[in-house]
Amino acid sequence: MTVETICLDGSRLKNRDEAMELLGQALVLPEWWGRNLDALHDCLTGLGRPILLELCGRSELETTSFGRGLLRVLQDSAAEAPWLELKTD
């Protein structure tokens, strides 16, 4: 099975609304998904297809409270879902 690679720019994920929109598009999430960190975790752990998330600009992401929370969700989801891998710079 082919691994889908999704590149994420941490500098564009610091703001909740922008991050949820970008992640929804990049991950091809359904229009009805909850657009919050809990819903993102549920979606990531439920995708069931091999995905590599390449996060560049991790230090940018860590500059906001939301960004730090998003990073934790990405890390926790990757630890829980065997088909999801997270690489950060």
Image: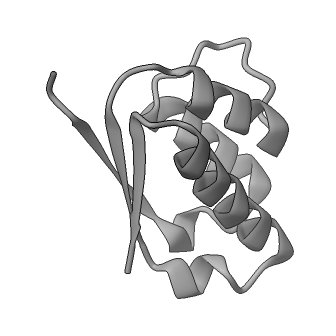
Closer to the camera in the image, 77 or 7: 77
State how the image is colored. Answer: one colour
Q: Tell me which residue sits at (39%, 34%) in the image.
A: 83
Residue 80, x across and y down, in percent: 60, 42
Which quadrant of the figure has residue 36? top right
Residue 18, x across and y down, in percent: 66, 51
Q: Tell me which residue sits at (59%, 21%) in the image.
A: 46
Q: Is residue 77 left or right of residue 63?
A: left
Closer to the camera in the image, 37 or 75: 75
- Count the numbered circles shown: 0
Can you say whether 14 is above or below 59 in the image?
A: above
Q: Tell me which residue sits at (78%, 31%) in the image.
A: 39
Can you say whether 78 is above or below 60 in the image?
A: above
Closer to the camera in the image, 80 or 9: 80
Residue placed furthest toward the left: 2
Q: Tell me which residue sits at (37%, 22%) in the image.
A: 49
Residue 21, x across and y down, in percent: 62, 39
Name the quarter where the C terminus is drawn.
bottom left
Can you say whether 29 is above or below 23 in the image?
A: above
Q: Is residue 48 left or right of residue 6?
A: right
Name the quarter where the N terminus is drawn.
top left
Residue 26, x across and y down, in percent: 43, 36
Which quadrant of the figure has residue 13? bottom right
